[in-house]
Amino acid sequence: MKIYSTTVKFENGIKVKAHRLCGLSVWKKETGPNFKKKFLLNICISRRERNLGTICRLNLHEFFAQTSANRHDEEHYATTQGFLAELLSLNATVGETQIWFDHSWKGGTETYTLRQFASMRDEKLCIRLRGLDCNYIQMTYCHRDHTDTMVFINEDAHLLLQHLRCTQLVVNNMASYDNPLNILGWIKGLKEKSGARVSVRCHDFQYFCPNINMVNARGIYCNCHSLADCKNCYPKIPLPLIATASIDEWQTRWYKFLHETADEVLCFSHTSADIFTRLYPLIAAKVLVIPHKAPTLREVSVSRHREINIVVLGDINALKGMAIVRKIDKMLKAHPDVRMHMVGKRKAKLRHTHVVGQYDLQELPDIMERLQCDIVFIPSIWPETFSYTTAEAMVMGLPVACFDLGAPAERTRTYDKGLVISRIDAATALNEIVNFIEKRRHITRQSEDWDNSPHRPWSYLQKV
């Protein structure tokens, strides 16, 4: 058997060593002081040299016997063969298989995916495809205690998918794929071949806008009411999250996919559903609203204190409102009785804000009590489709403030401790939050004074 290796350097400067054996291209990233995480074994199955079906039918014992003299590469080849063998075996024996097309980033989308897989993996085979850079797809499967991960070039991942039977195809989020429109063709073909149900999940608005949060060139939510508006808006965006040559083609292809291929479009708030039906009216019958399940957290008890403590919860970036946070941070010097705390990762230097950093969810109530939190501020400048941080704050019984955008405002508006800020502006946000807290404290003091008054009606005491 011919085995050789070579070193390849990608555009981003990362060097990998390629071991080629019997038609399998195995890419293993070299470790070094600059790499913090161990790189998952990258596998590329060469369609030109060996058909995937032939690889899958290879006898494992014969395969290992052929490569036994090559100890250095045997582990890599065994890993490849083991991945394919177990995946195909599980796919043939487990009753239901779901294939999820997902992005490779963190955040609420990944939280949702992992929770869904945890609830399904005992009964179903769950396969997750995550789009990576440089035309790669990471594939992970899990069923009970069986799980493994490998990385394929796009064409080989597509070839492997054609050998799998599935009952449901989930378009969870394809923002990190090299060419999401090509993947729509894959999904259509897989549905036609297997009869699987196609479910689209609305974590953002990439289905209309390649700048998936619908934030325009001025850095504000576009509040689009017609797709015709996008022809003037999209070309002005300097660095859209997804690059596409034609906004018309992007919207036409997605609209056709949602109308003809998708069986359901699952939204997590009524606000998101309204945006979908406003821009793509023909899919209105397919749109469902099923909010995420709120986390289980104990209610927070904050002792009386003098200063006002505003807590910004979550990992804050530009779209999550970092510019607003920066401006409020500068204003705090003129408000000595107001303190701001950031619980989560920070993306910028803040001079007057106390940064707690990353947190464990179950520790969050303790953190809020330690900070004597008066209100949780959600500074997002786009209409989030759910917002886990908003849900976490409400479950803990804390007051919540947000701008009049998306799911946070939808839930905050009906929350008895909620404040929907009238204008997306830092000074307005700070003033309205302070006034809201002072008003709540005044009402609380009046209630406590009444409770301690000797002039309360006897009927009230009986009820107590």
Image (cartoon, rainbow, N blue to C red):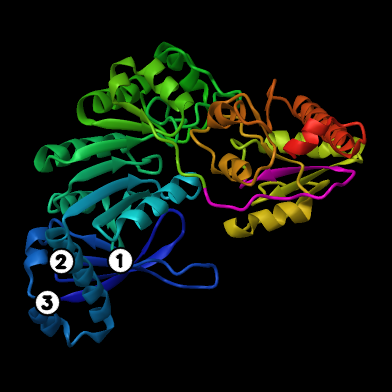
Pick whichever of labels 1 and 3 is earlier in the sequence.
3
Relative height, residue 156 to residue 219 (above, below): below
Image quarter hosting the N terminus:
bottom left
Q: Residue at x 15, y 53 (%)?
A: 164
Residue nearest the viewer, comparing 442 with 191: 442
Pick whichever of labels 2 and 1 is earlier in the sequence.
2
Indicate the amino acid at tag 3.
Leu
Looking at the image, is mark 1 or mark 3 nearer the viewer? 1
Residue 437 visible in rendering: no
Using the image, tell me which numbered label, if any, was put on residue 60.
3
Relative height, residue 291 to residue 163 (above, below): above
The secondary structure type at the circle numbered 2 is loop
Residue 3 in picture, x, y percent from top left: 19, 76
Q: Is residue 304 left or right of residue 84?
A: right
Residue 313 inside the magenta-drawn segment: yes
Q: Is residue 329 left or right of residue 76?
A: right
Relative height, residue 212 to residue 353 (above, below): above
Image quarter hosting the C terminus:
top right
Indicate the amino acid at tag 1.
Asp
Using the image, tell me which numbered label, if any, was put on residue 23.
2
Q: Which residue is mark 1?
A: 148
Residue nearest the viewer, comparing 251 with 167: 167
